Amino acid sequence: MIKRLRDSLRTLLGRDRFEREMAAELEAHLEHLVDDLMAQGISRREALRRARASFGSVDGVKEEARAARGVRWADELRGDLRYAFRALKHSLAYTAVAVLTLALGIGANTTIFSVVNGVLIKPLPFPESSRLVHVTRDYPLGSLWIYRADGSSYSAVAAYAYWSEVNIFTADEPERIRGRRVSTEFFTVLAVEPALGRALRAGEDAPGAVPVAVISDGLWRRRFGADPAVIGRSVPVDGTPRDIVGVMPPGFAFPVAGTEIWLPVALDPKLQATVWGGNGATLSAGSSQGSRWLGRMPSIGP
Amino acid sequence: MAPTPELLQGTLDMLILKAVSLGPMHGYGLLLRIQQFSRDTLQIHQGSLYPAVYRLEHQGLLASEWGTSEHNRRAKFYQLTPAGRRRLKDERESWARLVEAIGAVLGATTAEVPT
């Protein structure tokens, strides 16, 4: 079965050669027949006539030979298609309406599926993404402390602020890159291990902590020449020297592509008391933008 | 001379395989072989030969190669593949059984069915 399919395919692909060889073979056969007839003393013209007559229709034989090779369906398909196109050309209005309807239908369907696929069906590119919960409401920064304390419905909670562009000064050249301020549980919640070094640690977002940063793989290769000794190097970010503590693996860019540096949020526990009573303006300057949340459900069991 | 018996397609295939088994040959030569061995009783219609040969090649029972014939003409020569040899053997056995069975029916002398 496979052998026959392969043979049919080979014949289809080398169709010209097949036709030429078949014609040559049938021609040779006729020539042999003529030779033998002439050997019996018959004139060439008469021999030719008799040979052709006894052979029958050459085209008929060719058709049968093509069928024997299993290529007739391809010929018939081609013929049917050509006929269909001719018929459609005759009634352009009908064809136009049909094509338009198909186009709209297919287009709408594809669009809807793409959106649904991206939003609902495709799993997030993080390990254990089924346990991740993303809340996109804006919260005042100080409320992070409250959610941290409450461990009942989430096993870990992280927050991140709106992106900002920061100036990073490396190799005597400043560059503006996209950065995010994130809470220290950020990398734990996403469960992505840095490729080099470590992620942010608890306490690094407290006031007075040593300023640190985690950089992306792209930034590492571009500005630091993929140097493994980058861990521990101090790099000025918006004027503040920060120690680089980790490099994320390639392909990690949360929450948007192009995020190249993650800095701890600047939290001030003294503000906790003012969250519920006061106005947002008294919160630390860095958080006048809101913050968003990531949560992680505790294990639901096997 | 008795009229040429009608050949079933499967029978023609078997004869072609046998003719090829005697040595590589082109289509016209195969036709002659069958004719000569049957003492001219079997006259294969020219147009039936090539579809049958192409079918056998399609099934992998024959292999083909271009060569020069004894008349110094270019022709396509066929020979048996190992699969073809096996098929020929099977066909001969089936044929022998068929002939025996038909012969038994035709040779019946009484109306009684053998027990």
Image (cartoon, rainbow, N blue to C red):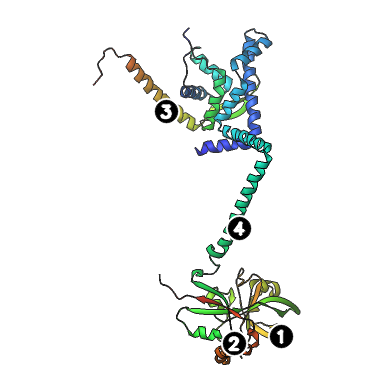
- The verdict on a common chain for dots 4 and 3 is no
In space, the residues marked 4 and 3 are separated at their CA atoms by 60 Å
In space, the residues marked 4 and 2 are separated at their CA atoms by 42 Å
Figure quadrant of residue A276: bottom right
- Give the percent coordinates (x, y) of residue B25: 56, 23
- Give the percent coordinates (x, y) of residue A121: 53, 62
Q: Which numbered dot is residue A267?
A: 2
Q: Are marks 4 and 2 in contact (CB under 8 Å)?
A: no
Q: Could you tell me if residue B13 is visible in this image?
A: yes
Q: What residue type is labelled 3?
A: Asp
- The verdict on a common chain for dots 1 and 3 is no
Q: What residue type is labelled 1?
A: Gly
Q: Which numbered dot is residue A239?
A: 1
In space, the residues marked 1 and 2 are separated at their CA atoms by 19 Å
Viewer-side label of 4, 3:
4
- Give the percent coordinates (x, y) of residue A244: 64, 81
Q: What element carries label 4?
A: helix
Dot 4 crowding, Cα within 10 Å, few <14, some 14–19, many 20+: few
Q: Is mark 1 on a helix, strand or loop?
A: loop
In space, the residues marked 4 and 1 are separated at their CA atoms by 45 Å
- Between A68 and A197, the one lying in front of the other is A68
Which residue sits at x=52%, y=79%?
A: A157
Q: Which amino acid does label 4 sit on?
A: Thr
**Above or below — where is A64 with respect to A154?**
above
The residue labelled by disc 3 is B90
The chain letter for the residue carrying disc 4 is A
**Above or below — where is A191 with respect to A64?**
below
Dot 2 crowding, Cα within 10 Å, few <14, some 14–19, many 20+: many
